[in-house]
């Protein structure tokens, strides 16, 4: 991909871009990862209807979800699992001199931990 004022960039497309690309946003997150966000104009078609079996879903705080057939999906609590590693990374960061090279490395490690938790939480409902 060729961008104005930047030049050639490698892009890892996870799916084909269907439609006409209107805008592109290049973004870097706190963990240092770069993202290309495309705004695309597409023509809408009528959505397909699913005539399969229907089940009710009750989302909660203690349990992730309760289904109408009586089964319960537990909440994985990803933050609780990594709490010990987070505490350690935050303690290491707080002891560094603010703005130093080692402080930046420690901040990067902490940001990666939070990004990992965020990704796990975002991914869980899809599985």
Image (cartoon, helix red, strand yellow):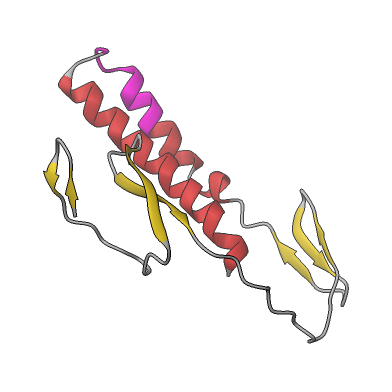
Residue drawn where x is 43% and y is 36% of the image: 86
Q: Main secondary structure of the magenta part?
A: helix
> Disc count in the image?
0
Give percent across and percent down for residue 4.
Answer: 17, 40
Q: Nearer the viewer, residue 118 or 53?
A: 53
Q: Residue furthest left?
A: 7
Instruction: Please provide the residue range marked out in magenta.
Output: 89-98
Give percent across and percent down for residue 31.
Answer: 32, 39
Q: Is residue 106 magenta?
A: no
Q: Nearer the viewer, residue 103 or 3?
A: 3
90 versus 70 height, above or below: above
97 versus 48 height, above or below: above
Q: Residue furthest bottom?
A: 52
Left/right of residue 40 with respect to residue 112 in the rendered view: right
Residue drawn where x is 46% and y is 40% of the image: 84
Q: Nearer the viewer, residue 7 or 97?
A: 7
- Where is residue 6, by image quadrant? top left
Give percent across and percent down for residue 100.
Answer: 19, 16
40 versus 23 height, above or below: below
Quadrant in the picture for the C terminus: bottom right
Q: Is residue 96 magenta?
A: yes
- Where is residue 73, by image quadrant? bottom right
Residue drawn where x is 39% and y is 42% of the image: 113
- Where is residue 65, by image quadrant? bottom right
């Amino acid at each position: 991909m060729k961008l104005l004022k930047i030049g050639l960039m490698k892009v890892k497309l996870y799916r084909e871009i269907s439609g006409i690309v209107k805008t592109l946003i290049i973004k870097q997150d706190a963990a240092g990862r770069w993202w290309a966000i495309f705004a695309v104009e597409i023509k809408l078609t009528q959505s397909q209807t699913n005539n399969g079996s229907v089940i009710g879903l009750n989302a909660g705080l203690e349990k992730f979800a309760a289904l109408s057939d009586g089964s319960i999906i537990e909440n994985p609590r990803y933050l609780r699992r990594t709490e010990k590693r987070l505490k350690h990374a935050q303690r290491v960061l707080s002891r560094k001199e603010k703005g130093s090279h080692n402080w930046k490395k420690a901040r990067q490690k902490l940001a990666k931990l939070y990004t990992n938790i965020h990704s796990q939480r975002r991914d869980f409902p899809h599985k």
